[in-house]
Amino acid sequence: MNIEQLTVRFGRFTAVDHVTLAVPDGTALGLVGESGSGKSTLARAVAGLLPHRGSVTGVTPGRIQMVFQDPYSSLDPRMTIGEAVLEGARTSRHQRAAQITRLLDLVSLPTSCAAKYPRELSGGQRQRVAIARALAARPEVLIADEITSALDVSVQGAVLNLIRELRAELGLTMLFISHNLAVVRYVCDTVAVMRGGRLVENGPVDEVVNTPTDPYTRALLDAVPRLAPA
Amino acid sequence: MRRLLRTPAGLVGTTLVAALLVLAVVAPWIWGSDATRINPAQIGQGSSAAHLLGTDALGRDLLARTLVATRLTLGLAALATGIGTAAGIVLGALPSLLPRGWGRCVVAAVDILVAFPALLLAMFTAVVTGLGGRGAVLGIGVALAPTFARLTHTLTASVAGSDYIAAARMLRVPRHRVLTRHVLPNIAEPLILNLAQSMGAALLGLSAMSFLGMGVQAPSYDWGRLLNDAFGHVYVTPSVVVAPAVAVTLAGLGFMLLGDAFAAAAARTIDPVGDAVLPDLPKAAAPADPDAVLEIRDLTVAFPGGVTPVRQVSLTVRPGEIVGVVGESGSGKSMTAAAIGDIVPHPGLVGSSRSRLCGVDLDTLTPAARRKLLGSCLAMVFQDPTSSLNPALRVGGQLAEVATLHAGATRAQARARAVERLDRVHIKHPEHVIRQYPHELSGGMRQRAVIAMGLMGTPRLIIADEPTTALDVTVQREVLRVLREVVDESAAGALFISHDIAVVGELCDRVAVMYAGRVVEELPAADLAADARHPYTRALIGSLPDMATDRSAPLTTIPGRQPAPGDVPTGCAFADRCALTTARCATRPRLVRDGQHAVACWEVS
Amino acid sequence: MTAHASPPAHASPPAPDRRGRRPGAGFLARHLLRLLLSLTVLVVASFAMIHLIPGDPLRQMLGPSAPKALVDQRRAQLGLDQPLVVQFAHYVRHLCTGDLGTSFFSSEPVSEIIRQGLPNTLALALLATLVALAVAIPLGMWSAVRAHHGRGRRTDTVFATLTGAAVAVPEYLYGLALLLVLALGAHLLPPAGLTGPSSYVLPVLSLAIAPAAMIARLARVETLRELDTDYMRLARAKRLPPWRTYAVHLLPNTLTATLTMGGLLLSGLVTGSVLVENVFAWPGLGLRTVESITQKDYPVAQAMILVYGALVLVINFLVDVALGVLDPTSTLSAGPKEA
């Protein structure tokens, strides 16, 4: 997937300013920045949810899927998990049950979840459902927008593990958005740093983390809290 | 339905409306002839045995006429509600169906119409359509439509803006299916709930129109028309207005109570029953720590229904020390902070076997002395910097009031101190900032201003409850630095509450890890990385990647969920999720201290 | 995928520039523009009113038995025989000079009717609003503070039941009840007309009760919400004396919503007074309005609807502007938003 000169404006305010990025097939690009940096706006524009200038090429239209930050508003409260998961999948009637089992299994949820409503699930489980729903449409690119930041600490690790497993299993191409550099470092191959709607640094994860060239990237890296080594 | 009848208001409302509906059906059959029987001998009489509520200008029984009029009144109200609802839903749904420009026009038109009182719209319509029942029904319908349109539009917009609609659009779900599967089901309930209230409004509006002579015309009669007729005789026989007036009042009340009950039933709020019960907490026998700024033993917070978010927590904070309390949501860490600050919300109860602040036993103080001590000794900082400062007051005033009220400073002194304290937390141009309102400050500045506010007195203890959670990492760094500086310079102690074990490890001197209301491990922050012993602490550290995490290995995960505060097992609360669980874990392990380190686990201590 | 992925109309993104404070001049201009637009719509609607009446409005006014010559003569007199555009131009030109036409039956100039009635109507609505606000805000706050401390669960139920019931009863029924009990029953107060200060009591009371109950409920909800904010928790943690906590920290934050509601109710009261004026034979606009509509005196009805509509719009405008000036987060004062 190639993003070229992508710009998003709200009135006079420019939220994303001529961003050009490449995400080779099968890799994961981490998008890092603080609140107001335009990273989520960029994601929504790439997903086709916002009007924008510039182009996104290398993906079949409709084969981009997205998982959102808030697992409490990303599932329709009046739809069962099974209905939600199959919403975008073109499945014949007699294959539905098998398909639901396969998708829920993919995100390590028991099949018994299919008949439940979102309110009966925990935040982490809902986020798994949202991932399963996105995978059902066989996406070429999966966008994950701060998918762990609304979750409790002990659940975050499990969701990150799941993302890594799915990448290895399905060869997913991913745009992974987070304010947490450590999380991005763990999940992604390359990383792009945004500030004020612009791209300030972009490169392989190890390179950016170990030898940052932009002063802002350095400030971000310095600010990551870490446990003192023994 | 059962939920509807549970409250007295719901019961009364349902009964009234049901009675009206029954009357509307049966009254004309039973009292129809009484209501139309003209009796020239008994014209315009007051209450009597034959005519309980008097007679009208033609000698007809008013009670009978009022009962019979129920049918027409309710029928017209239902008709008007139907017209208003249908028109309103169409108008409200149009903006999301039409092209953007046209949609905006509809929204603007509805906005203008909503501003006009219903009676005005109804009178306008009545002039155009002519006097009579038809005109009034149309008029009230037209008057109801804008409110319904606004409601429909707001509901549709909020559903349309939700993430699940965005997901559906990305899944290429066709537009009509989005409307039928997602939008309609989610807006239907509130719209239906609103019907009872609209019906009441329509009934009152129609009665008003008829009362003014602009609605139903003789020989037809609804309650408003009866009132209009009776009002002509009110100075002679005042009691003639009673029957229709009471009818309108009861109907208005019935529909309104029913509407309220619908809304309450939909909100599904369950009030806790009973009172909070605290366990028996005997006074601590061990000698008190003379140096500590805070020493609490067996702190417990209880809510009704057996909900105990904090269970026998013991903490000690010494001068110049930052003690971190870390845990997930629901672990009781914030409630611990609230209990120490004495701001646990009603109906929670707080108890302890010892609570000493600045060397004073709080339990021995009178309420006034306790207030004074807490006011001068304690500073608090909360999570959300946007809501920690009062939006209606200038920053300077909010800082200065602490000094003028507790330290007896003059306004000028308090102001000078405010400037100095803001400067101390590295806010640039403090003289300018004190004249600003909170919304003019950035999040990091606000949080530092809250810290400065705490420093207006001479606090011995600072309680910071997730003070950096809402901030960006670079801003978080500044706020943490300010907090450390303040503690180092003033030799106050601090209690730092956070869900982020890395932040706690970096900032604090000692760390207490909480799980399900209890401290499960307490250790020097420097030991977190290498010497954490409790399986929960170790899992917390292992489940979050940091800049040194091995990228080829999966992260540690903790299966299951933390038990809810009302649902904590008697044994080890972590046993269900723990890999080390044995039979011993059915009994709760005590916190066993080994020098600086204390752990509550059978398997590792 | 290309650049022109067109989003549907409802996909309004969170636009940061719309969320921010707007400059004072823009705020005023926006509200003025809105007022002018609404007034224009109102003028057109009131003009169109007569033309929307199905059939011949002159026939409606004069009745089926009137001779055709008379109908035509009156039509010419009112200018209704001219082309619509010309009529509208006349209508607007007359409005601008304060000429609102003449009554069809009494030949009284409408402007004279308004000059006599408007002050009485406004006095009634304003007094009722003030009474409602003065009683309701302290009552609602008091009830909320008590509920928040968990005291007086019984007073809470009584408060909820009474205010709930009070909202459901329309103003003219209060008028009737007060008339029956205090004027016709106890002879304490005058039953009708405007003969002195005591004449104000019953109409003002009947107008004020329902809005007062509504405002008290709102003030209670707002206060409860504010009591749960961090800054109120901080104010309590600062151990401020209760009067300071409530009067300085709480009151200003509950006022915005409460006064917005008060403003809305005031415009509602202006029309609610129509009913109360009819109960108490109050010499205001309401009495004449109802009379003109039931008698089909279209020129007067047209002018009255216009006047009431304009009153409502102007009141709403003034309330919006006043609140904008009072609320620090919406004023002109510029400053660094994000450092």
Image (cartoon, helix red, strand yellow):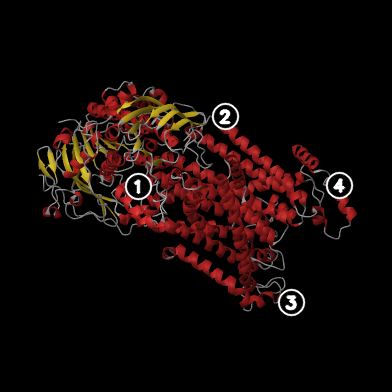
Quarter placement of the C terminus of chain B: top left
Q: What is the distance, in whole Å, between disc 4 and disc 2 at their CAs?
A: 47 Å
Please name which of the two marks, 3 or 4, marks the residue nearer to the observer: 4
Relative to B175, B409 lies left or right: left
Relative to C272, B585 lies left or right: left
User: Dot 2 falls on which chain?
Assistant: C
The number of discs equals 4
Q: Which mark is residue B40?
A: 3
Q: Look at the numbered disc 1 and give the secondary structure of its residue.
A: helix
Pointers 4 and 2 in contact (CB under 8 A)?
no
Q: In this figure, which residue is indicated by the disc labeled 2?
A: C25
User: Dot 4 falls on which chain?
Assistant: C
Q: Does the rendering let one see residue B191?
A: yes
Relative to C56, B260 lies left or right: left
- Mark sitting earlier along the chain (4/2): 2
Residue B29: which quarter of the image? bottom right
Q: Amino acid at mark 4?
A: Ala
Pointers 1 and 4 in contact (CB under 8 A)?
no
Q: Look at the numbered disc 3 and give the secondary structure of its residue.
A: helix
Q: What is the distance, in whole Å, between disc 2 and disc 3 at their CAs?
A: 70 Å
Q: In this figure, which residue is indicated by the disc labeled 4?
A: C76
Pointers 3 and 4 in contact (CB under 8 A)?
no
Q: Are marks 3 and 4 on the same chain?
A: no
Q: Does the rendering let one see residue B364?
A: no
